[in-house]
């Protein structure tokens, strides 16, 4: 992990403001207060995993509020999934509030206001997973119902597996290669999806309905055919013998993005993996573009640059 902040290296009276600045840049903008600013201490380490990030945080008592104004100022449009390792922490979001202790899991949304309070006689510890909302293939309105609620592992095998995985990532000081980081990104997002889907199964049985099964088949079909430049909503609907209107309705119910947006995102995610795979260094960028369904290299370069903020050649050279 990369050490981003350690209050021990900062003058006492500057620590809280410094932590506020770092949290704004590394996590999301919030308004932070401490009951005793001159006694405030904190440490932050981060592990980038593609578009996801795992952070290990240790901090003294504080309150953190994300207001509508903060959201308007900057919104990463991400989910944060917190594993409490020490201390008592409370959060209120989406009309739900709860107090969490060691071993608890909680999810919250950067696009919705929230208020968090940390109360600890000794420094609190949290592992925080953060990734773009669009990476979670679950209905946003259903995930919103879980924000601020306890997703405690207990005897729940899937949640316990995610908690163990997050702890291992933060405790293991062995550096990961860029290709390994992208693979771990896939694993951690899939595990998070499994945990949330498990809880939604109890709240919303239709997730196991015929339409959800068809949705999963369609998602798999898209992933298997990303190389096909003719892959589009009309061909997907025809392959599954459903109308285009019904295909869009299935995505509206089960996915945060449209069909076309999902295809484009999956193609560019596949390209990111190919560009950083050491076994594919012999492939030209144009070849990788074709493997991801782009017949015109210029179209691929433009789309990739817009998606990642970096041209594909620079992305390959710098990872």
Image: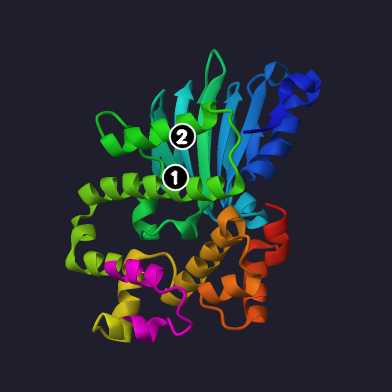
Residue at 44% x, 68% y: name it: 257
Residue at 58% x, 60% y: name it: 280
Residue under numbered circle 2: 166
- Nearest to the observer: residue 284 or residue 197: 284
Residue under numbered circle 1: 188
Q: Is residue 241 visible?
A: yes
Sequence-earlier tag: 1 or 2 = 2
Q: Residue furthest right?
A: 11
Magenta segment's dominant SS is helix
- Dot 2: few (<14), some (14–19), or many (≥20) neighbours within 10 Å? many
Q: Which residues are magenta?
A: 217-236
> Any magenta on residue 51?
no
In the rendered image, residue 227, in percent from the top left (x then y), is placed at: 47, 75
Rendered position, 247 above or below 174: below
In the rendered image, residue 299, in percent from the top left (x then y), is placed at: 63, 80
In the rendered image, residue 3, in percent from the top left (x then y), is placed at: 68, 31
- At numbered mark 1, what does the secondary structure look like: helix, strand or loop? helix
In the rendered image, residue 145, in percent from the top left (x then y), is placed at: 35, 50
- Nearest to the observer: residue 302 or residue 272: 272
For the residues labelled 1 and 2, say whether their Cβ atoms are less than 8 Å apart. Answer: yes
Numbered marks: total:
2
Q: Is residue 98 visible?
A: no
User: Which quadrant would residue 295 be assigned to in this image?
Assistant: bottom right
Question: How far, Cα to Cα, is label 1 from label 2?
Answer: 8 Å
């Amino acid at each position: 992990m990369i050490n981003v902040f350690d209050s021990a290296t900062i003058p006492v009276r500057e620590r809280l403001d410094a932590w506020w600045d770092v949290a704004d840049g590394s996590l999301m903008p919030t308004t932070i207060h401490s009951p005793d600013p001159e006694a405030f201490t904190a440490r932050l380490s981060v592990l980038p995993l593609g578009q996801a990030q795992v952070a290990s945080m240790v901090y003294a008592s504080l309150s953190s509020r994300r207001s509508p104004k903060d959201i308007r100022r900057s919104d990463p449009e991400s989910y944060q999934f917190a594993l409490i390792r020490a201390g008592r922490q409370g959060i209120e979001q989406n009309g739900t509030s709860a107090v969490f202790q060691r071993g608890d899991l909680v999810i919250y949304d950067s696009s919705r206001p929230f208020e968090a309070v940390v109360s600890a006689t000794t420094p609190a510890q949290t592992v925080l997973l953060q990734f773009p909302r669009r990476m979670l293939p679950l209905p946003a309105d259903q995930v919103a119902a879980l924000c601020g609620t306890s997703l405690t592992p207990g005897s729940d095998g899937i949640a316990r597996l995610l908690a163990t995985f997050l702890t291992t990532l933060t405790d293991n000081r062995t550096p990961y290669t860029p290709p390994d980081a992208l693979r771990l990104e896939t694993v951690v997002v899939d595990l998070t999806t499994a945990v949330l889907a498990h809880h939604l199964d109890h709240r919303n049985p239709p997730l196991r309905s015929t339409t959800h099964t068809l949705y999963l088949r369609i998602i798999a079909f898209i992933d298997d055919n990303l190389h096909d430049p003719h892959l589009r909503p009309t061909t997907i609907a025809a392959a599954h013998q459903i109308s285009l209107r019904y295909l869009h309705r299935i995505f509206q119910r089960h996915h945060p993005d449209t069909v076309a947006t999902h295809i484009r995102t999956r193609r560019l995610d596949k390209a990111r993996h190919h560009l950083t795979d050491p076994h594919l260094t012999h492939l030209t960028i144009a070849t990788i573009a074709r493997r991801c369904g782009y017949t015109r290299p210029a179209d691929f370069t433009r789309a990739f640059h817009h998606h990642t903020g970096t041209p594909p050649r620079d992305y390959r050279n710098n990872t």
